[in-house]
Amino acid sequence: MKNLAIIIALSIAFSLQSCAQNKKGNRAPEKVKTAFNEKFPDAKKVEWEMENDSEWEAEFKMKGKEYSANFSTDGEWRETEYEIKESEIPANIRAILDENFTDYEIEDAEIAETPAGISYEMEIEADDEEFEVTIDSEGTLTKKKESEEDGENDED
């Protein structure tokens, strides 16, 4: 009886591990992997995760930076993001921040590339409030205020 309990426990553990690997492992469709390899031939340490029902996300290293890239289940590239240092933010992007915020601190900054172009996404703190800020290649600023009470975003 004790052996049966051990076998059942191991079977359940193996099943749960297999499910987790299918969800998070390198199980992306071949179309997606092929499109990824064509776009990022120098990528290292690639890990796949299904972002939603129609999109896969790869997290990987390239050129000494951590990247993420999203592809549709058909292999169409949707977006690439990678972190940048505050010192790498261009002067024109910084000028837009200066026009819209006083006494702010940049918490995180990254570049997002999509078929529509490049944008800068930043988390900033200004006047004891946190914002998610995006500035696109046209210089358009969007900002979302982080609610301090419940963590939900409010459009400004």
Image (spheres, grey):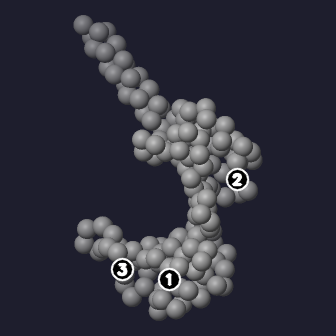
Q: What whole-number distance in Å separates the C-alpha atoms at marks 3 and 1?
A: 19 Å
* Along the line of sight, the residue nearer the viewer: 39 or 6: 39
Q: Kindly identify the residue that appears in the image at 61 percent across and 35 percent down.
A: 31
* Along the line of sight, the residue nearer the viewer: 7 or 75: 75
From what the image shows, is residue 69 above or below residue 34? Answer: below
Mark before the other along the chain sequence, 3 or 1: 1
At which x and y percent is residue 30? 61, 32
Q: Nearer the viewer, mark 3 or mark 1?
A: 3
At which x and y percent is residue 150? 25, 68
Mark before the other along the chain sequence, 2 or 1: 2
* Along the line of sight, the residue nearer the viewer: 107 or 36: 36
The residue wearing badge 3 is 156
Q: Kindly identify the residue that appears in the image at 35 percent across and 75 percent down.
A: 155
Residue type beneath disc 2: Met
Location of the N terminus (image quadrant): top left
Query: Which label number is shown at residue 62?
Result: 2
Q: What whole-number distance in Å separates the C-alpha atoms at marks 3 and 2?
A: 35 Å
Determine whether, in the image, residue 62 is placed left or right of residue 137. right
Quadrant housing residue 95: bottom right
Q: Kindly identify the residue that appears in the image at 66 percent across and 85 percent down.
A: 91
The residue wearing badge 1 is 105
Q: Kindly identify the residue that appears in the image at 55 percent across and 50 percent down.
A: 70
Determine whether, in the image, residue 122 is placed left or right of residue 9. right
Mark before the other along the chain sequence, 3 or 2: 2
